[in-house]
Image (spheres, rainbow, N blue to C red):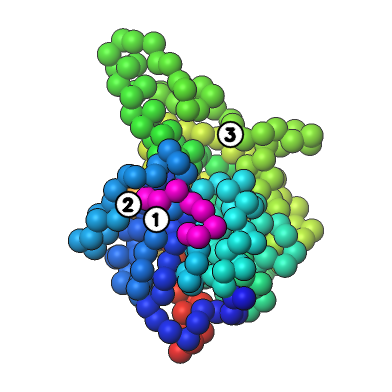
Amino acid sequence: MFSQTFPKKTPLKIAVLGASGAVGQEILTLLAERSFPVEELRLLGSSRSAGIKHIWKGSELEIQEVSAESFENVDLVLASAGGAVSRRWRRIINAAGAVMIDNSSAFRMEGDVPLVIPEVNPQALSDHQGIIANPNCTTILLALALAPLAKIAPIRRVVVSTYQSASGAGAKAMEELKELTKDVLEGATPVNTVLPYSLAFNLFLHNSPMQSNGYCEEEMKMVNETRKIMQMPDLPFTANCVRVPVLRAHSEAVNVEFVEPFSTQEAKKILSRSPGLAIIEDFENNRFPMPNDVAGKDLVAVGRIRQDISNPNCLEFWLCGDQIRKGAALNAIQIAELLLKAHE
């Protein structure tokens, strides 16, 4: 069976499940960029992606169709192939002795599965049972900024509106946005096939399944996951998620009510020294974080930290972060790095 961390040997044998997708590709890039100790790298996917070749650190690797044999003698599985796939292979992966870091929503709310953002709740890793869940992209970006403030003053309520890029729906959605934007500029009628509506020069409320309470699944992910990560199960929290015509990187408008007034100066000071964050703020020139500032980058940018004029106990701020990178692939790699560090 799996160990609490990894076998006491490095480098590791790693399988990337969902290697052809946008997050899977970013995981491969980050494994190389961050010099993660890899002895063997297995690229796994569906029958549709089997045979696709990828160059990694000068070597040509081919995506293999996933099977039970794919996980033999593997130490770590980085999964980003969707919840159904993760659920299908969970027990086989653990039975093979591998730790699974899963980017889907399949296990996030299970009581015995840690939901981890390394900068926020690394201690949760100590109780893992072979599966560690990567939070939703919008949750990761928000919690990076919310958690440091919550350490200083109790939070009474959170209100968030997200502006989510095409990258959140995958590589095919990004390509569709490019093509449909070109169609509109050339005078043609855009015809969408990936997203439910054309995103070219358009936006729409998040297309995840609607829930009985009038919130979509994406919004409830933010609510429930933030509560779990911050260990605040009763935190009043409401979210409104929107898909916008941006290729890569999500944005969020955040309103936080504290039990007492929280100065903007103190908040800026705290956020400026919090790991994973960068401040972009120039009120005089109306210059604050934009998706272009963070696309392809690790840090989440925060700015426009201001007093809510309707409530003296509320602060508002704006943030942008790369959904594929810190919102998914980077967070997974950082979790693996924490597990490795446990051996030191």
Residue at 62%, 76% (x, y): give it.
1
Q: Residues within 10 Å of mark 2 (few under 14, many from 20)?
A: some
Q: Residue at x 67, y 34 (%)?
A: 209
The residue under label 3 is which amino acid type? Answer: His
> If the image is split into quadrants, where does the C terminus sit?
bottom left
Tell me where the magenta segment starts and ends, as one range: 62-70
Callout 3: 10 Å neighbours few (<14), some, many (20+)? many
Q: Is residue 272 visible?
A: no
In this picture, is 180 found above or below 18? above
Residue 322: where, in percent of width, then height? Answer: 41, 51
Does the residue at mark 1 contact the one at mark 2 (Cβ under 8 Å)? yes
**Residue position for label 1:** 43
Residue 293's spot in the image, x, y percent? 33, 50
Depth check, mark 1 against mark 3: the one in front is: 1
Nearer the observer, 49 or 307: 49
> In the rendered structure, does residue 69 fall within the stretch colored magenta?
yes
Q: What x and y, as percent, mark residue 133?
A: 60, 61
Label located before the other in sequence (1 or 3):
1
Q: Nearer the viewer, mark 2 or mark 3?
A: 2
Q: Label 2 to label 3, Cα distance in Å?
A: 34 Å
Dot 2: what SS?
A: strand
Q: Residue at x 67, y 76 (%)?
A: 127
Q: Which residue is mark 2?
A: 62
Residue closer to the observer: 16 or 296: 16
- The answer to whether 286 appears left or right of 155 in the picture is left
Residue beneath the point at 47% across and 27% down? 194
